[in-house]
C-alpha cells in the first residue's frame, strides 16, 4: 500500500472529471480523497497498490469528452 | 458513466448455436451492446460488451477454458466476470472491483435468453425438445408479438413472453417457436426453433417463412 497525491491539470469539466476519478478509484479498489477541485485543476490523494495507482493515472489521460487533461503530476506522500 | 440496463424480463438474444463453446459473439438488445460467450463448460454468459480496462468490445475476446481474454491488452476475466489476470502486471492479484458487468443468461427452447442481473424471474422454461432453426434480420421491429404472428400468417398456440410464442404456421405440421429481438435503430432479429423431431422439409419450410419476414418488415414499406 502506498499513498500518492495526484494533480490533474487542463480544461476540466469539474463534475465529469470528479465522476471519472471516483469511477476509476472505485474500480481499482483505491481509497481516494479530493483535496481540491476547480475547472483547471483537481487534486486527489490516493491510497492503494502502487501498480493500481499507475493504472489510475493512465486511465485519467483518457477521460470523458468534456475533460481535456494536459498534465498529471504524481507526488509521493 | 452510463450503466446499461435492459427493460424487465427475458430477451431472446439469439439462436443457441449462434455462440458455440469456446467462442464469443455480439448482440444488441435495444441499444445495449452485449457480448455473449461460452467457455469449455458450454455455459452461456452475457456481459456488457466493454472491457473495464479500455472499453474494447469483449465480443472480440478470446475464450480460453472458462475465461474470456480481451483482445486489446489481454486482461482476462473468469466466468463470473471478475478480472483474473493482467499481463502487464503478472504478479498482481487484480482487485475484485475490476469486473465486467454480467447479465443473466440461459439457454431454453433453442434460444439464448438474456436478462438484467437483478431479474427476479427465471428464464422461460419451454416444454419440449427444440432445436434452433433460423435467424433473420429485419429493418423494422414488429410493434408487438401479434404483429409478428400476423406477418408470418401464423396462429398462436402458446404465448411464452411478450416477445416469444409457440405458433402454428401454414404448410408445416406441428408447432414452431418464434421470437423477436428489438435492436432499435439496428432493426430487429427474428428467431425460430423447431421440434427436434421435425423433418428436414419442415425445417426448410420454416426457414423460408422466416426469410419472407424481411419483405414484410422492410424499411421502405414502412410509410
Image (spheres, grey):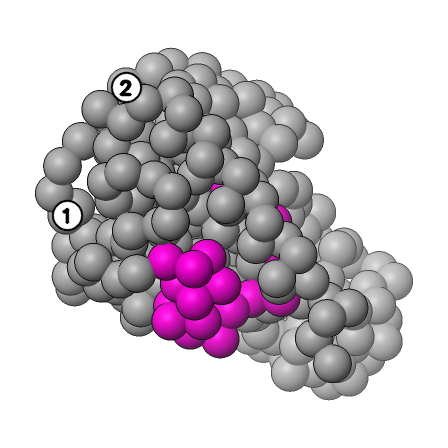
Location of mark 1 (residue): B125
| Crowd tier of the residue under label 2, counting other residues whose Cα lies within 10 Å: few below 14, some 14–19, many 20 or above | few
Location of mark 2 (residue): B41
The answer to which quarter of the image holds residue B110 is top left
- The lab-note entry on whether marks 1 and 2 share a chain reads yes
Label 1 and label 2: CA atoms lie apart by 21 Å
Q: Position of residue A1 (x, y in %)?
A: 43, 43
Q: Earlier in the sequence, mark 1 or mark 2?
A: 2
Compared to residue B157, the image places residue B135 above or below, namely above
B143 falls in the magenta region: yes
At 38% across and 49% down in the image, what residue appears?
B170
Q: Foreground residue, B78 or B121?
A: B121
At 39% across and 21% down in the image, what residue appears?
B200
Q: Chain of mark 1?
A: B
Q: Which residues, given as a range, are shown in magenta?
A: B135-154
B116 displayed left or right of B91:
left
The answer to which quarter of the image holds residue B196 is top left
Can residue B84 be seen at all in this image of the molecule?
A: no
Q: Quadrant of the C terminus of chain B?
A: bottom right
Amino acid at each position: 500500500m502506498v499513498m500518492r497525491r495526484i494533480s490533474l491539470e487542463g480544461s476540466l469539466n469539474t463534475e465529469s472529471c470528479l465522476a471519472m476519478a471516483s469511477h476509476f478509484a472505485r474500480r481499482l479498489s483505491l481509497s481516494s480523497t479530493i483535496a481540491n477541485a476547480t475547472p483547471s485543476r483537481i487534486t486527489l490523494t490516493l491510497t492503494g497498490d502502487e501498480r493500481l495507482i499507475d493504472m489510475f493515472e493512465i486511465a485519467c489521460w483518457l477521460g470523458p469528452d468534456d475533460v481535456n487533461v494536459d498534465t498529471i503530476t504524481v507526488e509521493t506522500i | 458513466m452510463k450503466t446499461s440496463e435492459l427493460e424487465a424480463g427475458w430477451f431472446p438474444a439469439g439462436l443457441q448455436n449462434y455462440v458455440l463453446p469456446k467462442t464469443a459473439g455480439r448482440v444488441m438488445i435495444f441499444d445495449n451492446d452485449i457480448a455473449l460467450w461460452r467457455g469449455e463448460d458450454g455455459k452461456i454468459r452475457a456481459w456488457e460488451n466493454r472491457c473495464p480496462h479500455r472499453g474494447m468490445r469483449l465480443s472480440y475476446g478470446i475464450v480460453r477454458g472458462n475465461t474470456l481474454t480481451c483482445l486489446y491488452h489481454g486482461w482476462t476475466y473468469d466466468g463470473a466476470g471478475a478480472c483474473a489476470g493482467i499481463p502487464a502486471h503478472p504478479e498482481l492479484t487484480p482487485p475484485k472491483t475490476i469486473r465486467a458487468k454480467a447479465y443473466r443468461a440461459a439457454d431454453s427452447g433453442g434460444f439464448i435468453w438474456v436478462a438484467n442481473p437483478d431479474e427476479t424471474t427465471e428464464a422461460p422454461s419451454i416444454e419440449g425438445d427444440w432445436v434452433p432453426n433460423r435467424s433473420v434480420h429485419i429493418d423494422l421491429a414488429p410493434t408487438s408479438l401479434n404483429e409478428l404472428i400476423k406477418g408470418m400468417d401464423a396462429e398462436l398456440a402458446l404465448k411464452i413472453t411478450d416477445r416469444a410464442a409457440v405458433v402454428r404456421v401454414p404448410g408445416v405440421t406441428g408447432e414452431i417457436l418464434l421470437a423477436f429481438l428489438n435492436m432499435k435503430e439496428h432493426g430487429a432479429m427474428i428467431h425460430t426453433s423447431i421440434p427436434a423431431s421435425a423433418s428436414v422439409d419442415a425445417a426448410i419450410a420454416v426457414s423460408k417463412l422466416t426469410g419472407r419476414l424481411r419483405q414484410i418488415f422492410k424499411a421502405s414499406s414502412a410509410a
